[in-house]
């Protein structure tokens, strides 16, 4: 895990009934082999700047509609796995930005009923990183001119990690 924020204290909470465990590669859900259960790992922190939170996740294989890994920021789900074949067996990256303040990030692994391969199935998270990023604030003065308003402040739109818009966005 890498932290690129000065003096940020992370407070972790691990599921008492089905705790996540640390392996050589990552942290792994604690409800393997247990139908109709969930396993939750969360952390809370405070930041004085816009912060990007990124991590990698992997599923051992496609487990259809009976096994999900969900990601939450401050109670809002920003990602859910287990609904397609597209993202299993390899690590996938995900990142979100949060504004300054106090935040809670939660990883929830859920296994449904009658999942016969649940003991072999796992979810895995690694390379958790928090880093301060510069947020670009743009006030759009003319409806429909958002792109021009942004490009007036940066050379390349791809360089913008966090954008806060205000003003006349629509006609």
Image (cartoon, grey):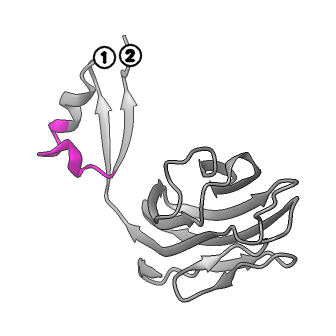
Q: Which residue is the extreme one toward the top? A: 171
x, y percentage for residue 68?
69, 54
Count of numbered badges drawn on the protein: 2
User: Residue 134, located in which quarter of the rendered image?
Assistant: bottom left
Q: Is residue 114 left or right of residue 104?
A: right
Q: Main secondary structure of the magenta part?
A: loop
Q: What residue is drawn where x is 21% and y is 42%?
A: 157
Q: Which residues are magenta?
A: 151-161
Q: What residue is drawn where x is 43% and y is 62%?
A: 52
Report helix, strand or loop for mark 2: loop
Q: Is residue 18 left or right of residue 90?
A: right
Disc number at residue 143?
1
Q: In the picture, which quadrant includes the C terminus?
A: top left
Residue 155 lies in the magenta-colored region:
yes
Report helix, strand or loop for mark 1: loop
68 and 104: which is toward the camera: 68
Q: Is residue 119 left or right of residue 144?
A: right
What residue did someone put label 2 on? 170
Q: What residue is drawn where x is 54% and y is 48%?
A: 85
Q: Is residue 73 visible?
A: no
Mark 2–mark 1 CB contact (< 8 Å) = yes
Which is more N-terminal, label 1 or label 2?
A: 1
């Amino acid at each position: 895990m890498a932290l690129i924020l000065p003096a940020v204290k992370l407070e972790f909470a691990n599921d008492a009934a089905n705790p996540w465990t640390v392996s050589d590669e990552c942290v792994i859900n604690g409800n393997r082999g247990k139908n109709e259960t969930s396993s939750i790992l969360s952390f809370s922190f405070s930041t004085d700047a816009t912060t990007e939170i990124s991590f990698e996740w992997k599923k051992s294989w496609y487990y259809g509609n009976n096994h999900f890994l969900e990601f939450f920021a401050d109670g809002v789900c920003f990602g859910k796995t287990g609904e397609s074949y597209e993202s299993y067996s390899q690590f996938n990256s995900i990142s979100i930005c949060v504004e300054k303040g106090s935040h809670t990030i939660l990883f929830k692994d859920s296994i449904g009923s009658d999942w016969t391969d649940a003991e072999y199935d796992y979810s895995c998270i690694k390379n958790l990183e928090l880093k301060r990023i510069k947020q670009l604030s743009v006030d759009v003065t003319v409806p429909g001119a958002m792109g021009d308003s942004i490009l007036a402040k940066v050379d390349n739109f791809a360089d913008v990690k966090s954008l806060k818009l205000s003003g006349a966005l629509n006609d």
